[in-house]
């Protein structure tokens, strides 16, 4: 028993020392007491005194009572607290030389009682909100955008951004008959010189009988919608650049032929479209690239459209201040509406206070001529900029996807923040007004019509991440033109898209104060009546794979600054919860304009944000390593370190679940159901399909048939859910991570297809690949 005594001694010292540290920070006394028990047990085992087993058995019972008091009858918190203790009790169960069988029997009884009570919590369903959405039609003949029912013309199917298809061949009753129809590999894979966040996030378009999708290195691929056969590929020849924070492409945009123009003729077979001569185009595809270009291509051949800009290529760095390589580029598809293509861009977070502008620009869809530009630093000066002028430095940008209502003549831009994100002293009043908001701009001249801000003086990188969804919402006053947009902090805002006024109330709530010298925190922050805001973290919410790394997380929780949501960043280090990953991110939500409901995937992961004063002796180490890590903020007095709040074993410090699926009634503004989503199958060495509620990134789609399709989670599955109650009703294994939003369409035979791009996501560590996978009902 010498080794066992040494093990108990070692664990006792760790728990006692760490427990004293936790007590000194105002935390729980349990760990120090547990350390004393382990030291006593070690001594008794070493001296072969017979009451070691009874002491340990009583300790198990006391630990169970403490665990139930802290976390309730909840499996994952109990497993974290009791799992290691039960394992460490096993050697004592077989230590017959130390004591009589009576005492062994007593310990065995204690051990089995604690083990059975702990294991029984697996069957106690927690963290679930059960409910039933209304699935009858409320709004007859809703606006779905000018898209044929069989097709998918835009990122969100139409410029309305609903992610809703009127197809109903696939239903909750037959969805289990879905099987793989075809699979295609693009050939675009991660290269040695690529940054860490190499991601496949594209949602294909379907026009006629052709699918169009882009790859991370900005290839535009055209596939036969029936068979998945390649028609053509255009390679923009974008090289690696380690200054980019992202290497991705979320989608392309489509301009249909105008009335009276000939319909495009699609070519079969495969080919390299970049070798074709450029041509005048009737219809056009717009491909944004990560070297800051916008390329117009012919949908039939993939040849560049020579009528647009310079031989089909528009350089988006024109008139840009500080046009550094890799600091500005577009990751999301532009919006094509009312004769213009509206382009925004991603500006690297926290690299340099002197960065490119976040200007929004509209170009003539046929010629590429600049029609207007809206820069939030100069919000009323929208006439095309002079050739010898520059846009504002580092003004707030829009990296996500916009929506448009051509009938109202408005485009809706989800706005980000000015870099540096955690330092507010560089912002102008105009930039403050439009940052972290949705702004409605007039399509004809770019003038702002209204703005609704979601974070005041944003110090947390809580930029608006998702495409606004446009639908008419039934209210007590009748049908209102609505806009629904989710946020990183968990609020879902429901606004009148004509006026910007809230349909469901927005209130101002008090927010924590106290910032570094020279900055300030807003005394209040907005909160929507419809929200998925988590309760504030407490020490008892800390978690870990074992009791020991849970102790580490508790110490960190007490050492870091945390006063709830919107705790300002600090040199001490601040817990940001919800974290920078967001309750919602670019995957957004899907809405059903007939049933007046939404479906989304709320996530709950805490991050830490630490400001590093540059005149301190602390070394910054490796800087500018993407969004997570240390960003230098060149030109500022502070660098910033951003990272997930993890235990030493790399698991989140807060207890699961971390990921859900949820449904809400948009007419009533109420969350109806919320369930854990996803398994740990691809997170552990053993393929354990344990439903834990895992993180993910990507979005859902809703069909008229009452089925929701979504992948997104960090396990490699595409899933189907029953829209009415959110229950998973089908899933299929994917060859790589499905961190993209799927889409659905009818093929030439009238069969409903579901397609997803599966290529993985570098920042969350899912399996990388280059797959496009299609499913259909068994014939």
Image (cartoon, rainbow, N blue to C red):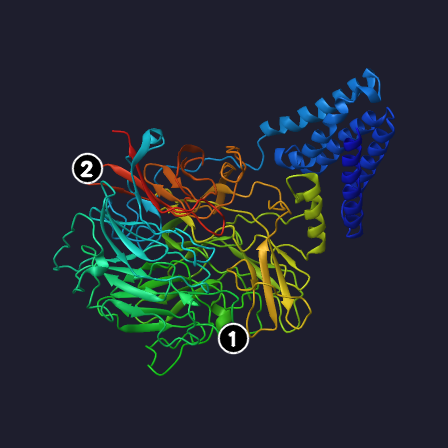
Numbered disc in front, either 2 or 1: 2
Q: Can you say whether 76 is above or below 651 in the image?
A: above
Q: Is residue 412 left or right of residue 657?
A: left
Q: Is residue 406 visible?
A: no
Q: Is residue 424 visible?
A: yes
Look at the image and tell me in which quarter the N terminus lies: top right
Residue 421 x, y percent position in the rendering: 54, 65
Relative to 75, say whether 301 is above or below. Answer: below
Residue 199 rendering spot, x and y as whole percentages: 42, 52
Q: Which residue is mark 1?
A: 428
Classify residue 743 by image quadrant.
top left
For the C terminus, the quadrant is top left
Residue drawn at point x = 66 percent, y = 44 percent: 541
Measuring from the top left, give residue 4's x and y in whole percent: 77, 31
Image x and y of residue 459, in percent: 57, 64
Determine the residue located farthest toward the top in the rendered image.
101
Does 14 sit left or right of 217 as displayed?
right
Identified at 62% across, 36% down, the residue is 76
Which residue is label 2 attached to? 749
């Amino acid at each position: 028993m010498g080794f066992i005594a040494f093990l108990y001694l070692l664990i006792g010292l760790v728990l006692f020392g760490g427990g004293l540290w936790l007590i000194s920070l105002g935390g729980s006394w349990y760990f120090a007491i547990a350390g004393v028990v382990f030291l006593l047990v070690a001594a008794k085992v070493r001296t072969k005194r017979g009451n070691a087993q009874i002491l340990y058995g009583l300790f198990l019972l006391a630990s169970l009572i403490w665990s139930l008091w802290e976390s309730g009858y909840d499996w994952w918190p109990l497993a974290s607290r009791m799992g290691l203790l039960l394992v460490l009790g096993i050697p004592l169960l077989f230590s017959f030389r130390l004591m009589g069988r009576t005492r062994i029997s007593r310990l065995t009884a204690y051990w089995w009682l604690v083990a059975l009570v702990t294991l029984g919590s697996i069957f106690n369903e927690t963290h679930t909100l059960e409910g039933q959405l209304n699935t009858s039609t409320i709004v007859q003949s809703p606006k779905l955008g000018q898209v044929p029912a069989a097709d998918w013309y835009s990122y969100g199917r139409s410029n309305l951004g609903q992610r809703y298809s009127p197809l109903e061949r696939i239903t909750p009753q037959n969805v289990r008959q879905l099987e793989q129809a075809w699979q295609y590999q693009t050939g675009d894979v991660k290269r040695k010189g690529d940054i860490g966040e190499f991601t496949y996030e594209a949602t294909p378009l379907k026009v006629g009988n052709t699918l169009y999708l882009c790859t991370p290195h900005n290839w535009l691929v055209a596939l036969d919608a029936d068979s998945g056969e390649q028609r053509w590929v255009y390679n923009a020849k974008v090289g690696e650049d380690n200054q980019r924070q992202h290497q991705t492409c979320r989608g392309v945009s489509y301009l249909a032929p105008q009335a009276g123009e000939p319909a495009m003729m699609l070519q079969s077979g495969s080919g390299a479209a970049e070798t074709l001569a450029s041509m005048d185009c009737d219809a056009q595809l717009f491909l944004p690239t990560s070297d800051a270009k916008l390329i117009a291509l012919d949908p039939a051949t993939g040849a560049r459209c020579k009528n647009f800009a310079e031989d089909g290529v528009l350089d988006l760095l024109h008139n840009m201040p500080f046009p550094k390589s890799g600091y500005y580029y577009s990751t999301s598809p532009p919006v094509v509406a009312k004769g213009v293509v509206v382009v925004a861009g991603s500006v690297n977070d926290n690299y340099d206070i002197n960065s490119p502008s976040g200007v929004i620009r509209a170009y003539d869809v046929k010629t590429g001529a600049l029609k207007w530009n809206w820069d939030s630093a100069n919000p009323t000066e929208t006439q095309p900029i002079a050739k010898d002028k520059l846009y504002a430095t580092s003004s707030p940008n829009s990296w996500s996807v916009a929506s448009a209502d051509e009938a109202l003549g408005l485009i809706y831009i989800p706005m980000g923040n000015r870099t540096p994100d955690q330092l507010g002293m560089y912002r102008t009043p105009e930039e403050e007004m439009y940052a972290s908001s949705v702004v409605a701009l007039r399509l004809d001249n770019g003038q702002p019509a209204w703005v609704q801000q979601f974070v005041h003086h944003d110090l947390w990188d809580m930029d608006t991440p998702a495409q606004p969804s446009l639908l008419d919402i039934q209210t007590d006053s009748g049908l209102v033109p609505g806009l629904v947009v989710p946020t990183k902090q968990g609020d879902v805002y429901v606004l009148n898209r004509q006026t910007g006024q809230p349909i469901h109330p927005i209130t101002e709530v008090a927010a924590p104060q106290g910032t570094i010298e020279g900055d300030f925190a807003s005394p209040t922050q907005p909160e929507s009546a419809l929200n998925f805001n988590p309760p504030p973290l407490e020490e008892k919410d800390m978690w870990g794979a074992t009791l020991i790394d849970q102790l580490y997380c508790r110490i960190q929780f007490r050492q870091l600054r945390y006063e709830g949501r919107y705790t300002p960043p600090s040199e001490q280090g601040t817990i940001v919860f919800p974290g920078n990953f967001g309750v919602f991110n670019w995957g957004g939500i899907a809405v059903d304009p007939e049933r007046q409901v939404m479906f989304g995937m709320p996530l709950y992961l805490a991050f830490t944000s630490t400001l590093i004063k540059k005149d301190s002796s602390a070394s910054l180490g490796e800087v500018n390593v993407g969004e997570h890590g240390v960003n230098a903020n060149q030109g500022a007095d502070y660098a910033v370190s951003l990272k997930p709040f993890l235990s030493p074993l790399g698991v989140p410090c807060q207890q699961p679940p971390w990921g859900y699926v949820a449904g809400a009634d948009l007419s009533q503004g109420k969350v109806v159901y919320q369930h854990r989503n996803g398994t740990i199958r691809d997170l552990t060495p053993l393929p354990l399909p344990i439903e834990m509620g895992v993180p993910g990134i990507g979005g859902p789609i809703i069909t008229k048939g009452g089925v929701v399709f979504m992948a997104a989670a960090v396990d490699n599955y595409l899933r189907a859910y029953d829209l009415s109650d959110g229950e998973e009703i089908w899933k299929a294994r994917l060859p790589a991570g499905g961190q993209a939003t799927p889409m659905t369409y009818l093929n030439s035979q009238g069969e409903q297809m579901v397609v997803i791009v599966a290529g993985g996501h570098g920042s969350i560590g899912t399996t990388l690949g280059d797959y496009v996978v299609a499913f259909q009902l068994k014939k």
